[in-house]
Amino acid sequence: MKLDEGRWVLGGGAGAQWRAVRSLRVKQARGELKALGALAKKGPASLKRFGLDKTVSYLSAGPDSLLLFPAMDCWLSVGRSFKSGDRPAAEWELHFPFLQNFAAAKAVLSGATCSFPVRVDPNARVHLTGTHLYFEFPKAMAGKDALVEVSRGAVRAKGGVAKELTPVTESLWLDYRDPLILQPVKVHGVLRPSLENEARFASVLAAAMGLIERFDAPLHKEISDFLRVIVPLENPSSMGSVSSSYRDLRGAFCLSHTDDVLLQAETIVHEFCHQKLNLLFAVDPLLLPGQGGEIVYSPLRPDPRRLGGMLLGAHAFIGVGRFLIRALREMSFSKKDRHSIERNAAKRLFHTELMLRTLSGYGRLTEFGARLTLRMWRELMLQYHDMLDFDPASVAAARKEIGEHAGAFRLGETGFHSGAARNVLSKKAKK
């Protein structure tokens, strides 16, 4: 398949190439699922009542949306650690019963009539993982088995009370309850908001999605096709926004609340760009083996970062820069707010140039990775032309801040971190 680098640098919609790459990821997930199903046959006898081999066959037939659901990504990632022997056999009972949750979800989505024995999680809940539905049980049921019965889209569980996760859009919802979604989330603390705050969070996110659709409809189509879950995050340092995404949780990312709709939209674009590259990695690694871990200067942080992070960062900031420039053209702002947004957008462009310099200068790229990088350079130059409309004071403030950071942490005009370089030289001198 010949990839068009332009539609992967920018929003290209959910067209033929998007569907083709998505299908390859589905194929990989299906293969991993079947391999883990074969492994499950060797598991403890106590798991036999779940009929996991039949569950695997049932799930392997799709739908694709379930095989791509972020919690399935997580389930497969954890499952691989059983295959490699990194997880003790005692944890089989904790992990493999979750497969039944996906099966129950499929039955609901397909309108089937069937029943599934399921394990009630430690918080006395059963999630139909892949949908926004779940059941709450009495605390005494935690760790015990329950029966989920599905009939033509309707679902019930004896002893459980049906609940729904809070929607953001028709295909996107908030989730801070499903343990399978939360397992990889380690960078920031998960927020468990009050019902009122949760509703406010969802409302702002819905408005942010509306802005994305207004300024970049193709990108909005991609987000709507792939993103399913947003996990609320704590923001203890009261930063403007904190967010994170995980390579083994594709289709979900984590985000703190703010009432600033534009900031939330910017952050959604940023994190989704990471998701987009992680999806693309199913087809092409972009960097040749061994390159991603090389340590370099990052214009975003005081500590050295990996070259793979420069690739992710440059790609995300191209998307953010495009979005902010369109917002500045289409929306009305006070003079103070416009200055702040222009300064932010200019910083992102300067950040992108520094990251692309390092990526181009030190990275060994695949053929497609080289084409993608060149296209990012071209898009950056177009955005620099758009920046000519900015207030020069906003641009100067951004450039000053970028220069101060580089002066403190970069080794001259290179792509290396000054402290990391000194450490290497010091070690060589000692030898």
Image: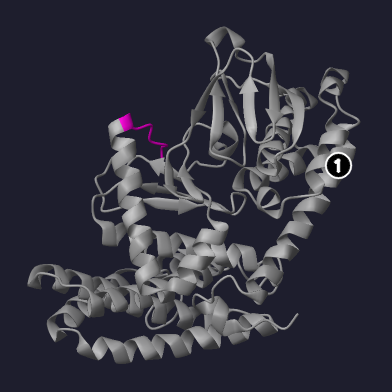
User: As displayed, is residue 117 above or below residue 388?
Assistant: above
Q: Residue at coordinates 9% horizontally, 69% vertically from top-left? A: 336
Query: How many residues crowd mark 1 within 10 Å: few (<14), some (14–19), many (20+)?
Result: some
Q: Nearer the viewer, residue 94 or 158?
A: 158
Give the magenta-colored segment's residue range: 189-195
Residue 168 percent location from the top left of the image: 41, 48
Tell me, yes or no, if residue 19 can be seen here.
yes
| Drawn side of residue 332 relative to residue 81, left or right | left
| Drawn side of residue 278 relative to residue 111, left or right | left
Quarter of the image for residue 212 reads bottom left
Residue 99 percent location from the top left of the image: 73, 34
Q: Residue at coordinates 26% horizontally, 53% vertically from top-left? A: 240
Q: Quadrant of the N terminus?
A: bottom right
Q: Residue at coordinates 76% horizontally, 44% vertically from top-left? A: 80
Q: How many marks?
A: 1
Residue 23 percent location from the top left of the image: 73, 64
Q: Nearer the viewer, residue 305 or 260?
A: 260
User: As displayed, is residue 370 above or below residue 299?
Assistant: below
Query: Most extreme residue toward the left, as rendered?
Result: 335
Label 1 amino acid? Ser
User: As displayed, is residue 94 above or below residue 244?
Assistant: above
Q: Nearer the viewer, residue 72 or 89?
A: 72
Tell me, yes or no, if residue 424 can be seen here.
no
Q: Within the magenta stretch, is there residue 63?
A: no
Question: What residue would you read off at disc 1?
Answer: 57
Q: Main secondary structure of the magenta part?
A: loop
Residue 334 percent location from the top left of the image: 9, 69
| Drawn side of residue 1 relative to residue 208, left or right | right
Query: Most extreme residue toward the front, as rendered?
Result: 152
